[in-house]
Amino acid sequence: MSRLIEIMDTTLRDGEQTSGVSFSASEKLTIAQLLLKEVKVDRLEVASARVSDGEFQAVKKITRWAQENGCIDKIEVLTFVDGDTSVNWMIDAGAKVMNLLTKGSMNHLIHQLKKTPEQHFREIEQVISLARSKDIRCNVYLEDWSNGMRNSPDYVFQFLDFLTRQPVDRVLLPDTLGVLTPHETYTFIKSIVDRYPNSHFDFHAHNDYDLSIANVMEAVRAGANGLHLTVNGMGERAGNAPLASAIAALNDFMPEVKTSVVETSLYSVSKLVETFTGFRIPANKPVVGENVFTQTAGIHADGDNKNNLYFNDLMPERFGRTRKYALGKTSGKANIEKNLQELGIKLSAADLKKVTQRIIELGDRKEMVTREDLPYIISDILDSNSIEEKVVVVNYVLTHSKGLRPSATLQVQIKGQLYEENAQGDGQYDAFMNALKKIYQRLKMPLPMLTDYTVRIPPGGKTDALCETIITWSINDKEVKTRGLDSDQTVSAIKATQKMLNLLAI
Ligand SMILES: CC(C)C(=O)C(=O)O
């Protein structure tokens, strides 16, 4: 039978200690509801006591909701060894579980509190006893426990002996400065679990050396009963152990344990926290980052078609996500075909080659091409297919400066002959058109009237590659629309104009 590991999410307490992050009361409640109802973490640490009036109001809002929804025992608040102050704060805020912050290393005890272990334990005992008399349950944090195990293990064990005699539900073991190696995490926790087999121990990792997930796994292997995690790894300095990665690692590498967390809800809570904090999820962040289920190399997309050669167990669907195939200079035909399949578009081999070529060109210019761009690229290419290039805009210089009118110098090749003109205009494109008009007037050739000019970008707002200009022209009472596509808006208008010139020349 698998062992159940309790997951305590501390995004709203330790996560909020990320520099520059502060949740409003409503944001805290929304995140708490999502974490408890959808993600189904076991417990939530929502605030530190006494921090501010705003924090007090937020806790009140959450405890009121939790009372009504029968989960008040899942809401925890970090409190201090401060006589009756934190306990009274808890009572007023309606909270029922306190995580009492105490000193887990001799170093902290001597230099910060300037107290003996006996004094510290006596004060802790008083707070716990008061809290219990008010029907508040107690967990105890041993702050700086990891350094305590390194430098003052006798003190740590003296402390743990003391706690076994207290009405405490859980002992919380923080690697406060994120300094533990996986080996130490295992050894320290194993020695504690072996000595106190009937107590409950949570491990609280920090990510200063990027070892938080490895440490979380070693803590579980050593027998820890619970883990403290945060959404997106938010938290002080380098943050805490990220919830999504920890759950994925436990599920995939430790079949002997299980958690209650619902993997498919991890992405939505991650996005919610990103939105509320403005703290962007790195695109390569495991499980929740934008790019982590995107195959970029064509050879990988090709392998996906051949017995899923490039898949691992982290299938995006597990986390409510989908695999994507990037478009760019390394993506190749296989990636483009995958995207076309998703869009339900079929192309001839010749057109596919042209689309591939265009995407490589865009990629070479360091421009990002998204799936949303693809229909625009295709329609541009199909459009151009049917037009014979009798008129080519060969070269142009466009100027735009403060205090001077925009100007254009233009060279156009018409049926093999090169013509050059320059002109000014109200904008760069207007200057371009005025130069073009001069050439056409010189040749006594008519130019249609521009009657409409529309600019669009592909939907989703994610592209930085493309802008589409659709120009409506009117000539001899007939209307014709041409389209140009480029990352530069003026260039896309010039491309649409060249198409019109070629339609005219037919
Ligand atoms: C405040 C304490 C509990 C903490 O977050 C830590 O030690 O990491």
Image: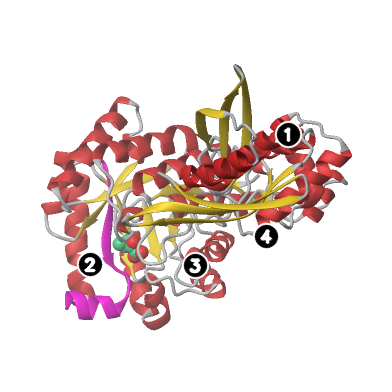
Three-letter code, disc 4: Asp
321 or 58: nearer the viewer = 321
Farthest residue toward the bottom? 151
Q: Which residues are magenta?
A: 96-115
Of labels 3 and 1, earlier in sequence is: 3
Whether residue 140 is visible here, answered yes or no, is yes
- Which numbered mark, 1 or 2, is in the foreground of this view? 1
**Alpha-carbon span between mark 3 and mark 4:** 52 Å
State which tag comes first along the sequence, 3 or 4. 3
Cα–Cα span, label 1 and label 2: 93 Å
Q: Residues within 10 Å of mark 1 (few under 14, many from 20)?
A: some
Residue indicated by mark 2: 121
Q: Position of residue 261 (x, y in %)?
A: 53, 41
Secondary structure type for disc 3: helix
Q: Nearer the viewer, mark 3 or mark 4?
A: 4
The CA distance from mark 3 to mark 2 is: 22 Å
The vertical placement of 468 against 214, above or below, is: above
On screen, 442 above or below 448?
below
Q: Residue at x 83, y 49 (%)?
A: 302
- At 69% from the left and 31% from the top, the residue drawn is 504
For the C terminus, the quadrant is top right
Nearer the observer, disc 3 or disc 2? Answer: 3
Residue 4 in sight: no
Q: CA distance from mark 3 to mark 1?
A: 81 Å
Question: In which quadrant is the N terminus drawn?
Answer: top right
View extreme (top): residue: 477
Give the CA separation, mark 2 to mark 4: 66 Å
Q: Amino acid at mark 3?
A: Ile
Residue type for callout 1 = Ala
Tell me, for residue 364, which label it has, or none.
4
